[in-house]
Amino acid sequence: MLLFESEKKQSKQKVGLRYTEFQAVVLAGYGHRLYPLTEDKNVPKALLPVANKPILFYVLDWLEKAGIYDVMVVTHPDAEHKIGTYLKNAYDGKIKPSLEVSKEDDAGTADALRVVKDKIKYDFVVISCDLVLDLPPHSLLDYHRIHNPTCTVLFYESSKSEGSGSSSAGYKEDGNKVMQELDNFFAESVKEIVGVDMMSSRLVYIAQSADLDDELSFLVAGTEDYLKSALPYSSAWAGDNDCYVDCQLYVYKGDFCCRSNTISRYYEVNRHMAKSVTDTRVATTAVVNQKTQVGADSLIGEETKIDERTSIKRSIVGSHCIIGKNVKITNSIIMDNVVIEDNVKLDVCIVCNNARIMEKSILKDCEVGAGYVVQAETQTKNEQLVEFRDL
């Protein structure tokens, strides 16, 4: 999360019947690292369910608590319709965000800000749609007010399960040789640097391999001294030029802060938010057989039907699902309109919208794509089960 001082800074603006000193830009990108959850047949990253609410809801709720009502959501053309429909018809908060579309493929933060630059009139917050945090908004905003920098950046300590994407307790994340070498480099020398990617002129903050891609030229093009190469472009550089950017860091060490931008982090965010739910854990419209066990750490969505002798533990089940007899679901996330037939066992799985898992299937550490049909008696683990379509 970033807070910026606007060059066109004005006095407090009136939004509806409220006055606000900040605007907000919410970045709702593609979410490539969440494949197959963010396939076109499922939902864009901003609408992925967390504790049976779109993740975008939590960001807008945080901004509402901060008293920030002038909000722009920037997304890509493929997600425009679905996010627009949610904001218009389903989101019931007090904020009335505008939806802006970046036409550039795989646009970054700077590209998104260029889309809305003419609409930024005063200090603004840049926040990703996948950020979930317990930080009270006033703590960060007051810090920015007191220090009055050009930019305030929120940093947080990663939990063990978030880490660099490594697997623990059944949660997995793919890696490669380049990422491992960079992990080793960071462990032995520099922990954090801010520099410029020479190929795309992007300003990059590097803390761990999960934040990297393998296209950063000053990291993987053969440069021997990474720190020396990056330092002249860093906010820590003390050169002869008197013109500088005042950048403040706010390090949050509180209860919870996590971006849901990988599969393992998506599990982590859902697990945390499921524990935080104070509403009814089993929706009043759900039909759950008396002989079925739903753990106190699980959630069941609206209009879902669950047959007898089924066990659901540490899991989240969405709306309009049908779950058969003698089904075992553990540490899993089931999205909306999913059919799970009799005698199925799911352990550490994510099942996307409209999927069907036929009888006697056993899946472990799997992601099932939207609309995919798992054939009867399938037994597999560590798989992404998706429909392949011609491009």
Image (cartoon, rainbow, N blue to C red):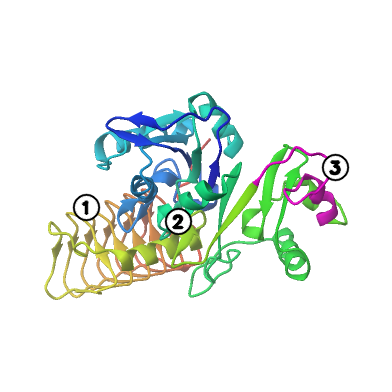
Amino acid carrying label 2: it is: Ser
Amino acid carrying label 1: it is: His
Q: Mark 1 points at which residue?
A: 320
Q: Does the magenta stretch include residue 230?
A: yes
Q: Is residue 206 magenta?
A: no
- Measured from the top left, where is residue 295 in percent x and y? 25, 74
Prevailing SS of the magenta stretch: loop
Q: Which of 333 and 141 is in front in this view?
A: 141
- Measured from the top left, where is residue 276 in percent x and y? 31, 65
**Rendered image: mark on residue 270:** none
In which quadrant of the rendered view does residue 184 lie?
A: bottom right
Q: What element carries label 3?
A: loop
Amino acid carrying label 3: it is: Asp
Within 10 Å of disc 3 (Cα), the crowding (few <14, some 14-19, many 20+) is few
Rendered residue at 58%/66% (across/down): 163
Q: What element carries label 1?
A: loop
Q: Distance between the residues labelled 1 and 3?
A: 64 Å
Farthest residue, direction right? 224
Q: Name the residue under label 3.
A: 240
Farthest residue, direction top? 118
Classify 146 as above or below 16: below
Q: How far apart are marks 3 and 2 (CA)?
A: 34 Å
Q: Name the residue under label 2.
A: 139
Provide the residue span drawn in magenta.
Answer: 226-246
Q: Nearer the viewer, residue 387 or 370?
A: 370
Rendered residue at 48%/75% (across/down): 169
Q: Which of marks 1 and 2 is nearer the N terminus?
A: 2
